[in-house]
Amino acid sequence: MKKIQIKDIELKLDIEQLIHAMDNSQELAIGLDGTIFTDTIDPKMPLMFRRITSGIDRSLSSKERLTALFGKEYKPLFGDTLCIVKPLIAWQEVMKINKDRMFYEDHSSDGIEVFNDERVETVSFEAVVFDIDYRVIAEFIEEHCEGDFVYYENEIQFSGFTIASNNDKAYEQVKYFLQDLINQKVEQGEIDLEQLDEEEQIAYSIIFKN
């Protein structure tokens, strides 16, 4: 996955382009790469901003309208032709607007609680009985699956989320990764397939199901 440290991002957006988008759509979204979306928003693009544009007074100046649009969370700065936004300022808002597209969310306090793809969550949950934890699976996803890993990290805390480019492909990769790990444990004598208890048998059948 492509790793994106949110504190490194500073977007310089064209004011006229933003105003044109506001005037011609009911909703405006901006990707972390600066792409401006109106009616159709890429479901696999990490978003920096997303908001309804109606209700903002069109009699205001362009900069006043954009200040009203971004609100107190984003604190935009303005040049002659550019609107400058640092999404780190609104990190919690960024997390919120990407909630429905996350593959999973990660925190330094809670770790990874759930994989939002039901299939990945199912095989990952079952793998725990074989001493394979969610962190190992997440590290595999970040290293080998396509998509974006957006995060904020400082000396005190860490938080982030991933968006997979293709959930179906990511699921297949995770499933085969778990199968390989379990097969390695069998070869190393850590797992005896002849001595599996009922819980382990169910988990094994789910992970190795075609």
Image (cartoon, helix red, strand yellow):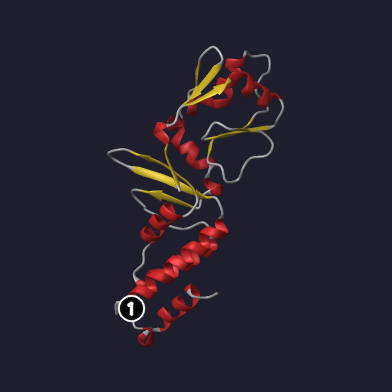
> Which residue is found at the position 66% from the left and 33% from the top?
38
> Which residue is found at the position 50% from the left and 53% from the top?
103
68 over 3 or under it: above or below? above
- As drawn, the residue found furthest toward the bottom would be 194
- As drawn, the residue found furthest toward the left would be 155
Quadrant of the image occupied by residue 22: top right
* Left/right of residue 185 with respect to residue 11 in the rendered view: left
* Left/right of residue 47 with respect to residue 20 in the rendered view: left
**Residue 66 in picture, x, y percent from top left:** 58, 21
**Residue 139 in picture, x, y percent from top left:** 38, 55
Q: Depth check: 106 or 80 in front?
A: 80
The local secondary structure at tag 1 comes to helix
Q: How many marks are shown on the rendered structure?
A: 1
* Left/right of residue 194 with respect to residue 103 in the rendered view: left
**Residue 96 in picture, x, y percent from top left:** 51, 41
**Residue 198 in picture, x, y percent from top left:** 42, 83
Quadrant of the image occupied by residue 97: top right
177 over 195 or under it: above or below? above
Mark 1 highlights which residue? 187
Which quadrant, please, contains the C terminus?
bottom right
Tell me if mark 1 has few (under 14), some (14-19) or many (20+) residues whose alpha carbon lies within 10 angstroms of its own.
Answer: few
* Left/right of residue 68 with respect to residue 23 in the rendered view: left
**Disc 1 residue type (three-letter):** Glu
Q: Depth check: 163 or 63 in front?
A: 163
150 over 117 or under it: above or below? above
> Which residue is found at the position 53% from the left and 64% from the top?
119
- As drawn, the residue found furthest toward the right would be 24
> Which residue is found at the position 35% from the left and 78% from the top?
186
